[in-house]
Amino acid sequence: MQGSDTDALRAPVTVSYARALVRAFGKTRGERDELLKGTGIQLEALDQPGAHMPVAALVVLAANITRRHGELWPLSAASVWSTSLQGALDVATRTAPTIQDALSTGARFGSTRAPFIRNRLRRTARSIQIEISPAVAMDDALWHAVALAVSLNVHAVYTQLLEDAIGQATLQFPWAPPAGAERLVPHYSCAVKFNAAAFLFDVPKELCARPSPFADPELHAKAIEALEAIEKPRSDSEALTRIVENLIASRLPQRLGEEEAARLVGTSRRTLVRRLAEGGGAFRPLLDGVLRERARVMLAAGTQSRDEMAAALGYTDATSFSRACRRWFGERGVRG
């Protein structure tokens, strides 16, 4: 695998996508656990506000859904592609001065919110296009499903921006129409073309000069600033630290080890140790920090016995848990 693919697989992505997908396709606890098989993420981790997961885990989840439901599964999960899940990217795109500026914003920052894809702005004699390609290796069925999901989100955004002119835009897919392609019709107001040269969204130039109906210079600038801030940690160890912490927390009460953590983020144990050290960290202190924070929350809540708290954090007995609390919090941590 190329280095760029490896970097993309390690990149953090919000768990909000995974939460929405698991809820859409897993109606029972057993079904949800099955969907998460191989991701390294436990169901409880999806309910942690602000949590992130590696792109690799999200790709495995999407592959599991594709095997169970076929490549048209995004049509059954409309809420996942709502613009509200795009956060600052949605705000920055909609509040851009013109449609052309919106396209440029989407091309520049699309992979900030969805690091499993790459975007490129293209200009032709008659149109401006966003060309979209996979940032990580995917088989054809999985990529077709992911591309369909991305296209639904693009359509949701530009239906609002182009309003009654959306029919002049075109979504193009570089493969033959899938079985059941007639199911796509109710989901798109723009033209849809298969067997194209690339996966792209094409907007005629005369529409690109239109002002956005939601243009707001101040809000747009703030959203761009937020997206630029999201980009920065990706180049340093801060993003990796967040991912490892989330993986540790998601595995409890099982204890995640260095070797398994390295596998889940798509690298070797040696490289993981080195990259954490570059940021002044190490795996054991990260593990200890996650356990300490969980213990602090449980002690403050006061709803569990010491044996229950010990079991929830993977300790063999309450005595071991009490020793850890004494180390973290002093004598106050072992009372009760």
Image (tube, rainbow, N blue to C red):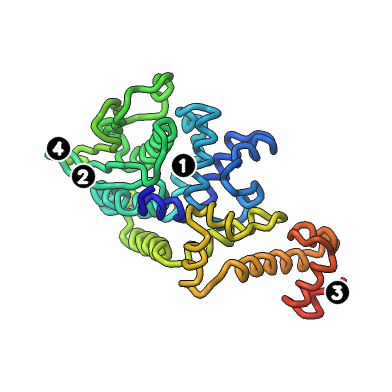
Residue matched to label 4: 126
Asked if residue 158 can be seen in this view, the reply is yes
Task: Indicate which disc, 1 or 4, sits on the residue closer to the N terminus.
Answer: 1
The amino acid type, in three-letter code, at marker 2 is Arg
Q: CA distance from mark 1 to mark 4?
A: 29 Å
Q: Is the Cβ of the residue at disc 1 closer than 8 Å to that at disc 2? A: no
Residue matched to label 3: 335
Residue matched to label 2: 122
Q: Which residue is at the far left?
A: 125
Residue found 31% across the figure and 47% down from its top? 119
Tell me the element at label 1.
loop
The amino acid type, in three-letter code, at marker 3 is Arg
Count of labels in the image: 4
The amino acid type, in three-letter code, at marker 4 is Arg
Picture coordinates of residue 232 (x, y %)? 39, 65
Tell me the element at label 3.
loop
What numbered label is drawn on residue 82?
A: 1
Q: Is the Cβ of the residue at disc 1 closer than 8 Å to that at disc 4? A: no
Q: CA distance from mark 2 to mark 3?
A: 65 Å
Picture coordinates of residue 103 (x, y %)? 28, 47
Measured along the vertical axis of the image, is residue 225 above or below residue 35? below
Q: CA distance from mark 1 to mark 3?
A: 48 Å
